[in-house]
Amino acid sequence: MCIAYTKTVTAAQMARRALALAGIESDIVGIDPRLTKNGCAYGVRFSCGEAGRVRRILKEKGIAYGEILGG
Amino acid sequence: MKYSADESVLYLDNAATTFPKPPSVIYESVKCMARYCGNPGRGSHALARAASEKLFEVREKLCEMFHAASPENVVFTLNTTYAVNIALKAVCSEGDHILISDMEHNSVLRPVVSLTEKRGAAFDTFTSVGDEKSITDDIKRKIRKNTRILICQHASNICGNVLPIEKIGLLCKKRGIFFIVDAAQSAGLYEIDVGKMNINALCVPSHKALYGPQGAAAVIFSGAVPDSLKTLVEGGSGINSKDIHMPSELPDRLEAGTMPTPAIAGLSAGIDFVAGKESELLRHEKYLSRILCEELSRDGRITLYLPERIGSVVLFNLRGASSVSVSEELDRLGICTRAGLHCAPLAHRTLKTGDGGAVRVSFGAFNDIRDVRRLIDGIYSVERYL
């Protein structure tokens, strides 16, 4: 599974909503603080096979995300 | 639409806080505390996620109701005063000039005065009682080169006066002035579109005409948010924990500490209660106000303030009696009104009610014509021995 790391839990919720509208299943997860620069963070977890579409959808919707982890 | 917690008490202080609350609001707050009240945005276990989801749901509802650009622009606060303080102090810089109306509540006046003392700001008041042109003309006269913020109420908390927000917003947009609206008395009764009305920040309470619980409110930014909003309060945000500063992203930048999830959950049901019915609710409250004003205007001992501006609120004085004594006597009859200055001495000065203020009657969704008749009988009864 891959995780798009978002800056806030609200951004993660917006991402999940946008992905759901596009038919992509995802859930909100906490990110291991060792993987981030500033500690606690949230993200949306989804199938890595959808990474390309996820990048495109988040960009289209203007939802800021740091990077896509995993895969 | 009649619902009352206690038939012996007639509650007519809805401008302070609406009462009773719809059963759905009570149910939703209790359900939150009983079933899913984790700490929103703090951890990713089931109850934290459920609480976060409820907050997000309400951000979306407020965003839709007031036509904001994104749920991220909805910042929760504890009450409208906090919302006003957060919005004002986020954007006010050293030496800024601020314009406020001459009807403002202390929730606006006091933070503005504080900014004059702490950030070297200056402020002027503009007239808010009159036709639209006289109001906007006065604003134009008062604008200076360094006027950066205009903050005003939408509807008065002491009478039926309503400001021409759309016209003021257009004027602010043309002059590059950040426009903050205190919608404490109007959110849930008047149609508000932050984009169409060029409102940069809208401050709304849960517990008034949105019929939610006390303890929650929001600042809703329209979308045009300045890059570096100054924070009013700093603390835990649930993210970026290693950073000693608040996150830069909304809403987290302005939401330090745990948000009041049970109150916000109740607000969700409150929004459902009023959504799409705003004009019907306003018409109902105006009808009650009109009946009351028509009756009281026949009494030579009673002075009504701005009775021609019919809204949800009626303000009056009984000649020869203090507002406090009238309200106390009405209370003895089981009728809740509010006397004095209503935290709005500036507005009372504008209306020339005198040092003792006046008696305020404010209607809500659950009042009806029988309540008006009982109040009128109560006032006449009080009048006989005061």
Image (cartoon, grey):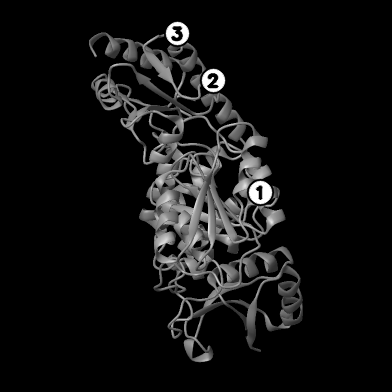
**CA separation, marks 2 and 3?**
18 Å
Q: Are marks 2 and 3 in contact (CB under 8 Å)?
A: no
Q: Chain of mark 2?
A: B
Evaluate whether label 1 is on the same chain as label 3.
yes
Disc 3 crowd rating (10 Å Cα; few below 14, some 14-19, many 20+) is: few
Q: Earlier in the sequence, mark 2 or mark 1?
A: 1
* Residue A43, position as x, y percentages in the image: 57, 77
In the depicted structure, whether residue B47 falls above or below residue B269 = below
Q: Which residue is mark 3?
A: B298
> Residue at image x 69%, y 52%?
B195
**CA separation, marks 2 and 1?**
29 Å
In the depicted structure, whether residue B168 falls above or below residue B321 = below
Q: Amino acid at mark 1?
A: Gly
Q: Which residue is mark 1?
A: B169
Q: Chain of mark 3?
A: B
From the viewer's perspective, tell me whether residue B344 is left or right of residue B176.
left
Q: Which residue is mark 2?
A: B287
Please tell me which residue lies in front, B184 or B214. B184
Disc 2 crowd rating (10 Å Cα; few below 14, some 14-19, many 20+) is: some
Q: Amino acid at mark 2?
A: Tyr
Residue B341 visible in rendering: yes
